[in-house]
Image: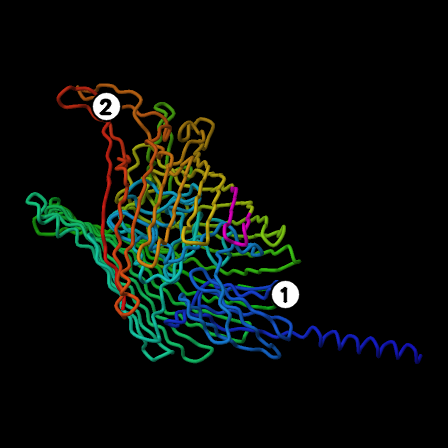
Amino acid sequence: MIPKKINLFILLVLTALTSFSQEKFTLSGTINDFKNNETLIGVNIYIPSLKIGTTTNEYGFYSLTIPSGKHEIEISYVGYQTIQKTIDLNQNTKTNFSLQEGGEELQEVVITDNKGKINIKSPEMSTNKLSISTIKKMPVVMGEVDVLKSILLLPGVTNAGEGASGFNVRGGGADQNLILLDEATIFNSSHVFGFFSVFNPDAIKDLKLYKGGIPARYGGRASSVLDIYQKDGSSKGFHMNGGIGLISSRLLAEGPLVKDKGSFLIGGRASYAHLFLKLSEDQKDNSAYFYDLNTKLSYKLNDNNSLYLSGYFGRDVFSINKSFSNTYGNTTLNLRWNHLFSSKVFSNLSLIYSDYYYGLDLDLVGFKWDSGIKNYNIKYDFKHYISDKFKLNYGINGIYYGFNPGTIKPTGTTSGINPDQLDKKYAFEPAVYIDAESQFSKRITVSYGLRYSLFYRLGESTINYYDNDSPVIFDSNTQIYKKGTPISTKFYGKNKVIQSYDNLEPRFAISYQLNDDEALKASYNRMAQYLQLISNTSSPTPLDVWMPSDNYIKPQIADQVALGYFRNINNGAYSLEVEAYYKKVQNRLDYIDGADLIANDAIEQVILNGRMRSYGLELMLKKNEGKFNGWVSYTLSKSEQQTPGRTPEETGINDGRWYNSVYDKTHNLAVTSAYNLNEKWSFGANFTLQSGQPVTYPNAQYEYLGITVPSYGLRNENRLPAYHHLDISATLTPRKNKDRNWKGEWVFSIYNLYNRQNAASINFRQNVDTGANEAVKTSIFGMVPAVSYNFKF
């Protein structure tokens, strides 16, 4: 018995010693900008000896559980200097770090050059993050720095043409992109019908584009997520910055409410092109301009609690000869509470309001039309750092929608228009999610999650019912689709459920590390989109109307898989990303020929449910270091749509065959570069080349009552000419900036250097003089030189 007891005692001692030797503690804190205390998103915290690390979340918080003892910690962030510091960890420790852009050394810290390496170990893929400093170096049209135009230089991202609203990701529609500004949904991302984006670059802290492998905390769109966060404002001192350009100007002010605890930010931007229009006699009653306002208040209650209140307001105004005016824009408001339950559990509670308004005033006809969409969103998110190898994200959210398809009012007593209200629509979209990231071995890291979303189409509304439940009928004699006639209607009272849906949305991603510099990654995600943009144009317009899914409009369900190879070259001086993807979308709306979408209170009579698919190969080579840096991206892809007949007798659209979607761009090449000559001069250049957009041209004509009528072939079987342009810029920073608080710079740019007349559209008509048919190309921009002056103090 004694030997057994001795053996048991020895085993217990060894177990205790082993447990002691493996004792772990948590290092946590926030990382901010040394100058202004602005928290930094996505900072890398790495322990080289243990080969483990983490990144800061959306509010600059990090948490890392590691063995006790002395460790060398490395903190790096693009655009900032990397710092290395030795820590002695013998208890749970909260340590905050400050990073700085300049070359001044911090005490007890070794500063090294920061290299923009790919995070090989992370399973995250199909994502792109751009710093605001990078975006501001890019030459753009009319000298206005533009967040949305910058992401068009990334692989897999295209636009619908010059001056077009929105962007397309991996062959998807612009309405399939979820665009968030401080967590609030932006329904129209463009000013002046696509010439500018709604995002003031001076107010933006961070942006990230998810093209695939989308985390489970995001939902509601079938293609991508563009997540943008505003700056918090400086809590150390008062600062102002802005810019004066040929078309628009901007001004931003930030400073402390309470030093080192609270801050404010307010920024405004406005265009004044309409002033130049009035100088012309024939344009003096025309007007086209925009303005927007960004605001944010931040306050740190204590080490564990912070409050944020942020908002955005923007409007576009367009009018012609006082007979037509159009006003549209976004309004958002978000109240957030960050709470730290422990060094391992971080939470964020948000109350969000978002409103998109569209107004049209036709004085000639004598009526005013208002429409829009509002939503109210509450969300509670948690990030749980369970260990250095296992992290959890989980949360809930609920969105209540109010849709106004159209309110028509007469503008005077002489108007022949009767007031009318198209049926308002309401919906509720709750969801719950959980996401995990696990490091299974030194080489394999996996993230996996599940989102469960529900959708309730609510009253009060009148619903049409049709014979055989078919609002669209097919005439076999004429081989065309026609509107069905309701056989009955039913009124649903307020908040009564008209139709409901629910979907499980799994997400999965894996990284297999080949060595310290190479990795293979794969991902899969399913996304459900319950809102539909009613539009038959390739680019969204303010006139388009958002609609909820109902008993006729089904939610879009997107499934996407991606496989990629990632490599850091020459210790991160260069990086290479190669990805292949395949995406399919169920229930993509298609429209019957001659569909009337404007002010249509029975939209189900002109739409059919089809499907989409897209697939492609993306390559991106980046140079991350030196005076000369930038990237080359290329995408080879295909995007197609199919709407087969519902019965063997029906033809469907395009005879039920797959056809090019309007977002199909076979080739997409983008080159962007920046060169810092010296402290005084820096230069930038962009080159873009895309395949022409699919369009439908007439292939024949006939005469009817003396009028020549064109006959069109299959949808999107033709293309516009290839789209390409070269843009350059030069930035002059006076040397005297170094010795004074006021710092200024001059930015000179030329958009479309060789004056390429890219076709926005090609229309066919009969020449009045000769009677011959002719094609007329419409181009928006030729060569556009611009100059702007930026300042800060």
Is-magenta flag for residue 101? no
- Does the image show residue 297? yes
Count neighbours of disc 1 (C-alpha within 10 A) and say few if under 14, some if 14 to 19, many if 20 or more.
few
Name the amino acid type tagged 2: Val
Question: Separation of disc 2 and disc 1 at Cα?
Answer: 74 Å
Q: Which residues are magenta?
A: 566-581
Q: Name which quarter of the figure residue 534 lies in.
A: top left
**Residue 50, numbered label:** 1
User: Which residue is the site of mark 2?
Assistant: 709
Q: Residue furthest left?
A: 281
Give the mark nearer the N terminus: 2 vs 1: 1
User: Which is more toward the observer, 300 or 240?
Assistant: 240
Identify the coloring: rainbow
- Does the image show residue 423? no
In front: mark 2 or mark 1? Answer: 1
Is-magenta flag for residue 580? yes
Give coordinates of residue 499: x percent, y percent: 43, 51
Where disc 1 sits, the SS reads loop
